Image (cartoon, grey):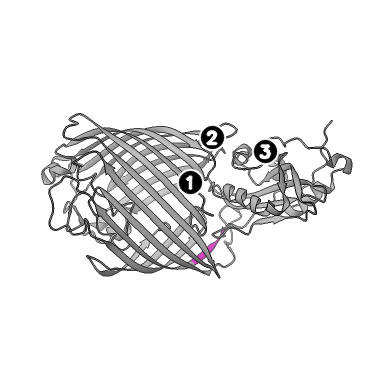
Amino acid sequence: MKHRGPVYFLGLVNVFLGWLLLGLHPAVAQTPLPSPPPDSLRELSQERHPPPLAPVVAPTDTLVRVGACPMRRVRIVAILFVGNNRTRERTLRAELNFHEGDSLTVADLPARLEVNRRRLFNLQLFHAVLAQASCGGTGQLTVLFSVQERWYILPTPILSLSEDFNVWRTRPDRWHRIDYGLHLVDTNFRGRAEQLTANIQLGFNRKYELFYEAPGFGRRRRVGLGLGISYYQSRNLDYNIIGDRRLSLPSAEEDAFPIQRFYLTGGLRLRHTVQLSSAFDVSYHREQVSPLILGLNPDYLLGFQQRQYLEASFITTNNQRNTFAYPLTGQFMSGGLTFRQFVGSPDRSPAYATLRGRYSRYLSLGHQFYYALGLAAQTRLFAARLAEVDARSLGYDALVRGYDFYIVEGRSYGVVQQGLSWRAWAPPPLRIPFVNNPKINTLPLAIYLNAFADAGLTGGGVGLPARPSNQLPGQLQASVGAGVHFVTYYDRVFCLELIRTLTVYPNLGFFFRSTFPI
C-alpha cells in the first residue's frame, strides 16, 4: 500500500520543500509516490498564503533553485504548484516536459527546470514563476513551482488615438480622430488560459467585437479553438497613396461611413506547448466603401463599392525566446500561407495567396549587452492585378523604422532589422503604498539603451496604374537610430527612439512605440 508523509506549509518555499522531504519515513521514501491530485496545493495555499513573488521583467533566467543532490540521477516523485488560485493545475502540467516517475540527470536539472519555468512564465498568466527542487539525499526528487498570478479580468476604458501615434500627430484633424469605449478581456477564462475579449468602441472608429481563444482542451491541451466576430466603421479612410503617403479625406464624412468592414472567423489551434503551435482559420469578410471613395479612387476595391470573400489561413509558430514581451535570448520562427477567394465577379477580383515568413535571433553578449536580428518577408501569388488596399506592403506590420509616415505598394517585400541593447538600470521592484493586492501593488522596471539599423525593399508590380509621385516602390529603405526602452509588468514595453532615415526621404525624427520592435 502506498503512503504519503505529512506536509506542512511553513511560508517560505524552500523551508516547505525541506519539511516535506524530512517528514517522509525512510522506509516510505523508497516507495514511489502517486501523482498528486489536480490542484493539490490549492487548498493549502489558500489556508496559509505564501509570500507573494515580486513581478519579473527581462531577463528572467535566475529563478531556479536546486537543493543538494549527491547522486548522479534522481527520480521525480512529486510535482507541486502553489499560488495558482485561479489557474487550473492541469493547464500548467500540460506545459511541462517531465512528469512524476521520470528519471533525470542531476547535472542537467537546473537547465531542465529553467526550460519549464520559462514555459509557465510565457503563458503570460503570472507576474513571476519560481522553480525549486530538492532530493533530500534519497534520490527522490520533489519539484515545486511557485507562481504569482496576474489580474486576469481587465475592463479598460477606451480613450485612444485612431491610428499609430507617429501618423496621428501629423493629421490636421487629429483631435477628431479619437476613439472611446470599453475593452473587456479575461486572459485566463475558466482558469484554463483561454482568452475572452469584447470591444465596444465609439468615436472616430466604431468597432463591435467578440473573440474567444482556447489554446487547447483536454489533459494534454493539444487541440484548441478560435472564434470571432467583428464589425467596423470609420468616418475617414486612407483611400490612396500619393507621394508615398496616406491620402485621406480632408474632413470626415458626416452622413456616411467611408469604410465598413464585417468578418466572421473560426478555426482550430494545434498546440504542442506554449512555444510551438499552429493555427488554421476560415473566415468570411464583407467590405464596403462610400460612393465618395469609389469616385475618388475606383482602384481601391477594383471598381467595386462592396466586395465579399472567403479566406483560409494556416500559420505555424516556434517561439523559443526567453520572454515573449521583451526577448533577450533565444529565437523566433513563424510562417504562414493565406488564400483569398472573392465571391462574385472573380474575373474582376481574382483569387490570390499570400506567403509570409519571419525569423528572429537574440543573443547575450555579456556585461548586460544583448544583440537582436530580425528578418521578415512576404509575397503575393497568382493574381496579376490587386486592389489598391491589398497592394500595400511596407508601412504597416512590416516597417523600416523611421519610415512610419510612408506606405509602399508592392507584391513582395523583405526587411532586416538589427539592434544592440544594454541593460542600463533595473532597480528593485517599487512597492505601491496603500495597495494590498500583490497582483498590482509591485511595479517592476527595467531600462535598456538601444542602437539599431534597419533596411527594407519592395518588388513586383501589382497591376495598377503607376503613380510617378510614389518613389519608394523598388527602392531601398535604410535607417539608423538610438532609443530608450522601458519594460514593466503586464508585458508592457515603451520605446522612445531618435531615427535617421538614409535613403529616398532622408530625415531625422522622434518616434514612440509600445511594442518591442524586433
Q: Is residue 446 magenta?
A: yes
Side (left or right) of 294 relative to 162? left
Give the image quarter of residue 63.
bottom right
Checking the image for residue 318, the label placed there is 1
Residue drawn at x 73%, y 39% as measured from the top left: 101
**Depth-wise, is mark 1 or mark 3 nearer the camera?**
1
Mark 2 or mark 3: whose residue is earlier in sequence: 3
Nearer-the-camera pick, 63 or 351:
351
Label 1 near label 2: C-beta < 8 Å?
A: no
The amino acid on which the numbered mark 3 sits, given as a three-letter code, is Asp
Label 3 near label 2: C-beta < 8 Å?
A: no
Residue 418 visible in the current orientation? yes
Q: Secondary structure at mark 2?
A: loop
The amino acid on which the numbered mark 1 sits, given as a three-letter code, is Asn
Q: Which residues are magenta?
A: 442-447
Residue drawn at x 24%, y 55% as measured from the top left: 407
Residue 106 position in % (x across, y down) = 73, 52
Q: Which residue is mark 2?
A: 222
Checking the image for residue 39, the label placed there is 3
Task: Judge the density around disc 3: few (<14), some (14-19), many (≥20) Cα neighbours within 10 Å.
Answer: some
Predominant secondary structure, magenta span: strand
Q: In this view, which residue lies farthest toward the top?
A: 344
Give the image quarter of residue 244.
bottom left
Q: Quadrant of the N terminus?
A: top right
Mark 2 or mark 1: whose residue is earlier in sequence: 2
Residue 50 position in % (x across, y down) = 70, 51
Q: Is residue 398 above or below residue 267?
A: below
Residue 137 position in % (x across, y down) = 82, 51
Q: Is residue 140 above or below residue 517?
A: above
Residue 437 visible in the current orientation? no
Nearer-the-camera pick, 274 or 193:
274
Label 3 near label 1: C-beta < 8 Å?
A: no
